[in-house]
Amino acid sequence: MAAHIGRRLRKGAASTAVAAAAVAALSASQAPGVAGEDNRPTTAGAMDSVPDGTGGATGNSPYYTDLPPLKSPAPSPSAPVGTPVSRGDAEAGIPATVLDAYKKAAAELRTSKPGCNMPWQLLAAIGNVESGQARGGQVDADGTTLHRILGPQLDGNGFALIPDTDGGAYDGNSTYDQAVGPMQFIPSTWAWAGRDGNGDGKKDPNNIYDAALAAGHYLCRNDWDLSREADLHSAILSYNNSQDYLDLVLNWMEYYRKGTRTIPDGTGGVPEHRSDEGTQRVPSPSPRPTQPPTTKPAPKPHKPGGEHGGNGGNETPEPPKPPVPPTPPPTTPGTPTDLVDHLTGTGTGKLTAMTGDAFTERIGVRAETKVGKSVAKVRIRFTLTGDTDATFANGETVATVATDAKGVALAPPLQAGEKTGDFKVTAAVVGRQVKGVEYTATVTERVADALARTGTDPLICTAGAEFAEQVQVKATYRGAAAGKVAVTATLVKSLIDARANDKGPYFKDATGKPVRSLTGLRTDANGLLTLPKLYADDTAGTFLLRVTTAGGATLTVPLTVEAAGPPAVPTPDPSTSSDSPAPSPSASS
C-alpha cells in the first residue's frame, strides 16, 4: 500500500505484470498526454530527486494497482488480450471527509507554496493508490481512521529493511517500521514531514487531514512546480521511484480531473489488487545449534587387482587431496556515506536575525573520514528544532543537501519568523549514525536606531482643550523603514526624569480616563506610527512627550499648553445703547 524509494522487490509477480500492461493500455486509450505523452523516458533529474533515507516518503511497501474505469466496458483495442478491466463507477466516488481533506490541503498549499500549483486530484490519486481512500472512507468526523492502516513490517523479507525508528509509537511495532495511515508514511519520514492539517495541535499520520497536508508539502519540496510535467514526474517518483507507480498515479489524477462525486464516509469501495501479489513471505529460519563435525572413516583404497581391475595390488594408492577452500563472495565497494566518520562545522559565525528577517550567515558542515579527508556526494539533513516558527527559505523545517567536491554542504538560507528566542539547527548524515553538528540560532525582536517626527508645526493647545494635530513618528533602522517595531510613548516629568508626569497633557484609555504612558504600540510596515489624540488639563506650561522604540531610538517632542484668558467683554452697539449722548440743539438764528 505504501510508496517507496528504490526498486520494489516484486518483480516477476504475475498480477503486477498484468497491471502494468493494463496501465500502458489505459495511457494509450484513456489519458493521452498524461504519462509519457511524447514517449520519452523519465528524465534523469526525476530519478535523481529521490528523497533521502531508506524509503523516501513511505518505505519499500506495496500499494494498490487497481486501474481507473475505462471509458468503455470493453478493453481498448490496443490492450493485450486478458487485460483486466478495473472496477466500475464506485471508483469515481470519493468519501466526503477524505475529499474535503484533499481540497483543504491543496488550498493551504496555494497560500503557503503558491509556486507549487498543487492539484487536489494528485493527492486523491496517491490516496487511492496508497490506501483506497482510507479504505473507502473509514474515518470519523475529525478525519481519523477508525482502524489503523498499516503496511507490512519492513524487515527485509521481501521488502526493504527499516529497523524501528519510533519505538512503535505510530505503527505499534518496536522492532521494524511499518507504513502508517491513509497516505502510508513510515515513522522516520513522518517525524519531519508530518503536519497538523485539522488544527487540533497534533500531527497524526492516521488522520486524513494531517496526512494529506503532509503529503502535499512532501510533493511540493525542492521548489517543484507541479504544473510542469518534469517536476510533476519528479515529485511522484520521489514518493515511489517506479515507472509503473508513476503511470498509475497519473492516470488516476487524470480520471479525477475529468469528474468525480462525493459519497458518504464508509461507503467507498476498497481496491482488490496489490503490487505484492505473488510475493511469498518466507519467515526467517531459526538458528540451529552447532553440531560437532562428523568424522567419517577414510575410504579404503581400491585394489587394482580387485573388482575394478589393476595390477594385482602392487600399486601404492595416491594420498587424498586437501579440500579446496570456498571462494569468498565479491565485496561490494562502499558508498561515500560509508566512508564518513564525523561532521565538522565550516566556521559559521553567530546566527542572529530580527523577527521577519533573513539570517545573513549560512550554516555549513563538512563530511570527513576518520583521518580528516573530505567526502563528496554525502546527503546531509539539516533539521530545525525548538519553539520557533523560523524556517529555511523554502518554508520547510527540514532540508537535505549533498556535499560538494570539497565535502561541504550548505543549508538553505534561514528565515526568521515572528517568535523571538533560541532554536537549534542540527546537521546529520542521512543513512549513517555518526557524530553530527548542532548550531544555536537566535531570533531577536525588531529594532530601530532612529526616530523622527513626520510633521514640523509646533504642538500648541489651550488649557482644557485638545491638541488639533496627532503626533506621527517614523522609525528607521540603518536608513531603512523599521516596520513592526515596538514603541512606548510617555509624557515625562523632565528631560532627566523619565517618570510619567501627573499633570499636563494626557491620552485617554478605552474608558476615557487620562493616561500618560502608552505601551504595546508598534510601527506599521513603513515604519510609521500615529499616536492617539492628546488632551490638555487646566495646567499651562511646556511639557515633554518621549517616544522610544525597541533598540533604543528616542524622540522627545515639546507640547505647549497656553492658559485660558479672561472672558472677552462684548463691545456695545452704538445704535442701541441708552448711554448715547443726546443730539446737540440746533443753533438759533
Image: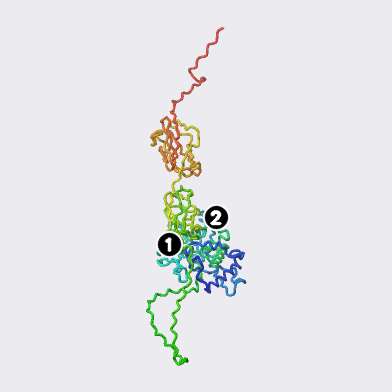
Which is nearer the eye, 578 or 516?
516
Which disc is residue 115 wearing? 2
* Spot occupied by residue 126 in the image (x, y as percentages of width and height): 52, 64
Which disc is residue 378 wearing? none
Q: Measure the alpha-carbon separation of dots 1 and 2.
A: 35 Å
Q: What is the quadrant of the C terminus in the image? A: top right
Q: Provide the secondary structure element on which disc 2 rests.
A: helix
* Spot occupied by residue 281 in the image (x, y as percentages of width and height): 46, 73
Q: Provide the secondary structure element on which disc 1 rests.
A: loop
* Spot occupied by residue 575 in the image (x, y as percentages of width and height): 52, 20
**Residue linked to disc 1:** 433
Which is nearer the eye, 483 or 358?
358
Q: Amino acid at mark 1?
A: Gln
Place residue 567 in its image quadrant. Answer: top left
Residue at 42%, 49% in the rendered image: 421
What residue occupies the far top of the structure in this picture?
589
Sequence-wise, which precedes: disc 1 or disc 2?
2
341 to 468, vertically: above or below? below
Residue 574 appears in the figure: yes
Q: Amino acid at mark 2?
A: Gly
